Image (cartoon, coloured by chain):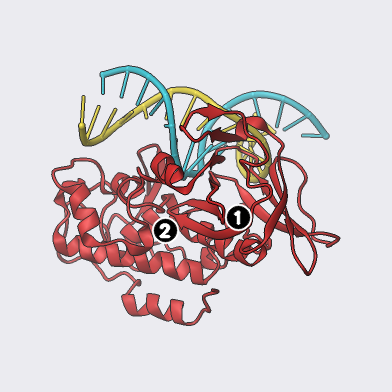
Chain colours: A red, B yellow, C cyan
Amino acid sequence: MPELPEVERVRLTLAPHMIGKVVTRARLLRADYCESVDERGRARRTKPSDLLEGATIARLDRRGKQIAMIAEDGRALCFHLGMSGQVLHRPRGGRREIPSDHVHVVWTIAASNGACDIVFRDPRRFGGVWTFPNHALMLERRWSELGPDALAATAEDLLRAAAGSRRALKALLLDQSVLAGVGNIYADEALYAARLAPQMPAGELTPRDAANLAGLVREILARSIALGGSSLRDYVDAEGMPGANTSMLKVYGRAGEACMGCETKLERMVIGQRTTVWCPRCQAYPRVDSSPICPQSKSELRKGVKQSVIGS
DNA sequence: AGGATAGCCTGCGGGC
DNA sequence: TGCCCGCAGGCTATCC
């Protein structure tokens, strides 16, 4: 389930194969997987040039769970991996096996040390690709609705959205217009670390809670990036490598098991159509002053980050 | 208008 | 062995 850390790993592992390189060929194998617009923003059939054929890639950007490819001549596209999307680097003549089913886009990249393909596959097709004649139109059409990137989450971002709101705190964290990049896994993990109940009305968030929660969101995401992301089912980066953050998860996927802090059986509930796992004691609501200590101190988080090397 | 809900889509594991 | 069902969930459209 690619969320911000997994998407960032894809961006980081894709970058050396694409930045400064020329796209010699771009193929869309499934027409309905990509939407394109002309200079006036009107929908049109996708052409290879829309998918950056002939362009030199200037940079790869990311906002939340979306990645953008920006060409030197201004053309731009962005994509979302949805639930099952993968963007894989395949060297020409290489031995690396890539499943050939569910492939929707293939970019061929020229390089002095040999050509390669960048293969976008997405079995469940919850993801997609959107192309634009210029970067500004991409920002306007696709990224303007997104909140600040969750790696830079602040207490103010949360408090602004939470003010007067009765929606569940977890639903707020999952709202991409509040913070871009948090998904079901990291929402549960951050709320557990912050000892806040997922069903708590967002409007009850105090400035102190918000500061703590924002800091934990940043640190949990940063640590996961450093560890290569969380591989639950089929997530791998562009080099086909799974992530090692899965073993760091304290509540996600552990319903019915014991809380690592207090041994209480973790409960499962549904919030906003999403499975939510939480500790009814550590994350008590209404709050209880004498709740036990859960093992997710900031020092422990920092240790996890420092022990890993963040790629550039 | 904020907030909740259906629907998209495939693969997989459990139960029979 | 094989089939059916439930479940996984990011996002958009739609409804209340």
Residue A21 x %, y %? 67, 61
User: In which quadrant of the rendered view does residue A115 lie?
Assistant: bottom right
Q: Nearer the viewer, residue A284 or A239?
A: A239
Residue under label 1: A235
Q: Nearer the viewer, residue A306 or A252?
A: A306
Residue A305 x %, y %? 45, 77
* Disc number for residue A124: none
**Helix, strand, or loop for circle 1?**
loop
**Helix, strand, or loop for circle 2?**
loop
Q: Does residue A260 appear in the picture of this structure?
A: no
Residue under label 2: A251
Q: Answer with mark 2 or mark 1, whichever residue precedes in sequence.
A: 1
Residue at the spot 63% in from the left edge and 51% down from the top edge: A86
The amino acid on which the numbered mark 2 sits, given as a three-letter code, is Val
Work out whether disc 2 and disc 1 sit on a shared chain: yes
Q: Disc 1 is attached to a residue of which chain?
A: A
Residue A133 x %, y %? 53, 42
Residue at the spot 35% in from the left edge and 60% down from the top edge: A190
| Residue A282 falls left or right of residue A146 | left
